[in-house]
Amino acid sequence: MRAGLAGLVLALTVMIAGLSARPDGQVHITVLDVGQGDAILVQGDRGGRLLIDGGPDPERLIVELDARFPPWDRRIDVLILSHPHEDHAGGLPRLVQSYRIGRIFEPGMVGPGPAYHAFRADLALQARTPELLSTGDRLQLDSIGLKVLWPDRDAVPREPPDGGTSINDVSIVLLGTFGAQRFLLTGDIEQEIDPVLLSRGLPRVDLLKVAHHGSRTSSTDAFLDAVRPRVAIVSVGAVNPYGHPAPETLARIEARGAQVYRTDRNGSVEATLDGSTLTLRADRGGPATAGRADGSALLEEPKVVGAAVPSGGPPAAFRCAIAPPVLGTLASRPVPPATVASPSSDPAATRPSAATEDGLYHRDDVHPIPGGGGGTPPLDQPVGARPAPRSSGRRGRRLAGLPDRRERNPHRPACGRSRSAASRRRQGAPQAATQGPSDPRPPPR
């Protein structure tokens, strides 16, 4: 009797999960709460899935994704690495081992950090190489039109000149269109790129993913005057050592009338587009504001959570061509094969750049600001799930959140405690405070 009831409950749970996650004809853009980094999930109106970046922490990324997909559907149709910094590439080695990935894109620069090289090594084991994206490429995910605004093909050196700004400034910038709505995903571009984009024309947008975690070197006045977002989302880690987001950057955004959400205080933030209205849903709280004199943020009552924000419609002078809808896949104009050799075949590609500092940010941008990075530590909460078509070839039965005991990846960093740390605990010696993977250490002074 008990076994029968348990089976019935399980069947009902699976059915509800499948029904609740079926495509609803709307676009869902979720800035995932992955700590001090970026991971953005875009779900098309017909079920297509695009993931932009993987955050700094593989476990946290998988938890966020697993909460949104049922265990039988470990599928990402398109993966884009906006640029090869560790706070965007850290979760990708685990992702390519745990999920079925369709097409993979990147800007073409070799990253200096271990996660990027582990990611490329894992792809090499699958005999895969990422494709390049550059200015002018047009992509299609279901009914979503995506246009690449940056970087130019000749603006991406294979080896980064330094470990910070030069890597940030090759970030893939995507302008998305769905019906009468626009959204702009900016990676980590800094102030040097804003004039280039402005010179080519920028439309007003409904939704902006704020560049470079809201640093003081991002989102210039001229850029914000052009795009005038209705909602701006900052992907940032709680109590991070970089002072992100900078109070002056938040003030610039809010001065244009945008509602600001932050993953360090709101958790994962989901924007739903139906072609004319924008609906926001956050794990907790409403939009944040930088209204205090000391630069720390206030959290308002959740007045707009779940409420519709009217769209301003497309600008008359700007059009983004939309190709015929494609379910679950991405259509683009032909993109030349990536010129970055896989780590397994190019010894030079396996070495970190000699110019790297900490693999995350340029030293000029590391100026912690009192109150600028404070806040309640984020929480991970499930949002939903849905079924998907079966992939070709053998069935993928392994759950994404479980390790594969059949093979061990030699490129994955060790997760165990060091012998010296264990010895100190046995002897009762005090230990130095350590930082979690979501909040990287600042570079040495």
Image (spheres, rainbow, N blue to C red):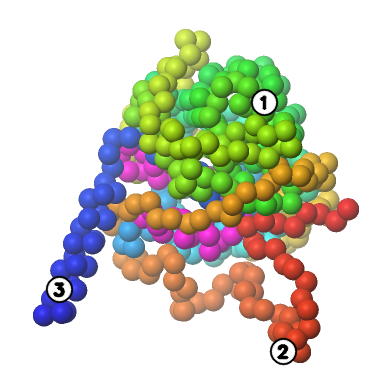
Residue at the disc numbered 3: 5
**Magenta segment includes 180:** no
Residues in magenta, as a range: 42-69
Quarter of the image where one finds residue 171: top right
In the picture, measured across the screen, residue 414 lies left or right of residue 280, that is right
Please name the residue shown 40% across and 55% down the image. Answer: 382
Residue 101: percent from left, percent from top: 44, 54
Q: Nearer the viewer, residue 442 or 1?
A: 1
In the picture, measured across the screen, residue 323 lies left or right of residue 251, that is left
Residue at the disc numbered 1: 252
Is disc 1 in contact with disc 3, using a CB cutoff of under 8 Å? no
Going from N to C along the chain, the mark reached first, 3 or 2, is 3
Amino acid tagged 2: Arg
Q: Marks 3 and 2, how far apart in space?
A: 48 Å
* Other-residue count near label 2 (Cα within 10 Å), few / some / many at <14 / 14–19 / ≥20: few
Note whether 380 is above or below 181 in the view shown.
Answer: below
Please name the residue shown 53% across and 36% down the image. Answer: 300
Residue at the disc numbered 2: 426
Amino acid tagged 1: Arg
SS at badge 2? helix
